[in-house]
Image: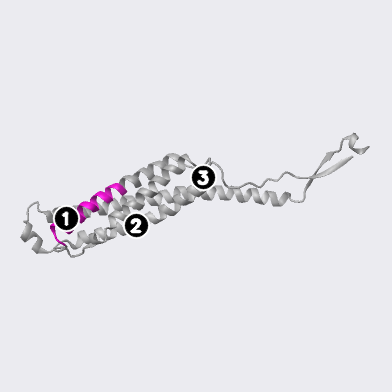
Amino acid sequence: MWEMTPAVNLKSNCNVNYPGMRVLPIRICSLFCILCGIASISTQTAALAIFLETFDRHYVNFPSDFVGPGIWGGSFDVIAGCLGIAVTYARKKTLLVATVVMAAVSIFASFSTSLLSAGAASLGVYSSCYRKFGYSNSICDTWLELQWALMSCGILALISSIVLVILTSGSLCTCCRKHNSIVDMTAAFQGTYVGQPIPDHQLQ
């Protein structure tokens, strides 16, 4: 005699080890984000010190240093890079989502940093700056070089953050597709039964 028992439940959650995760590219991009973030913070700090102390908030056509975009932008870059490296070791969904979100925020921050510093470097300083501090190797040229360097750091961080978002979101979407396919299989087999024999002693 046969007894009908439910089929095996195939449903599972998405907390897997992400076997398809591209670990090395993620770590490289994360490392670039960290380095660019540290460089942005250092460069912005030096430019801000010149702007506040030497220039006394004068001589600059576009005082973007007053906002300090390299400091907060670089901070987001460092955080995104640290999360990116962490997610390659502790492969958790919450950490992966946090990496995607923070890398997306880093994209906006890096773009703002490069845009503001490019505007400050392009507009330059007043001619009175050179008259006061000199025309050859003056502090005015040093400030401009720092702005161009900050723009370069922002562009590199922007590229690294974009690639990091693509890599991490790709791993997340791959997991979700596998999860949905498992759920679909479960729904297809729902209500299906597999026959199993009942031992003779249970029939007595």
- Tell me: 129 left or right of 91: left
The type of residue carrying mark 2 is Ala
Horizontally, residue 148 falls left or right of residue 204, namely: left
Mark 1 lies on a secondary structure that is helix
Task: Look at the numbered disc 2 and give the secondary structure of its residue.
Answer: helix
Instruction: Kindly identify which numbered label has been placed on residue 92.
Output: 3
Using a 10 Å C-alpha cutoff, classify the residue at mark 2 as few (fewer than 14 neighbours), some (14 to 19) or many (20 or more): many
Residue 109, disc: 2
Tell me which secondary structure the magenta stretch mostly adopts: helix
Determine the residue positioned at 56% across, 50% down: 176
Question: What amino acid is found at the position of numbered circle 3 in the picture?
Answer: Lys
Say how many tags the image has: 3
Labels 1 and 3: the sequence-earlier one = 1
Query: Residue 89's x, y, as percent?
Result: 46, 39
Residue 43 drawn in magenta: yes
Q: Which residue is identified by label 1?
A: 50
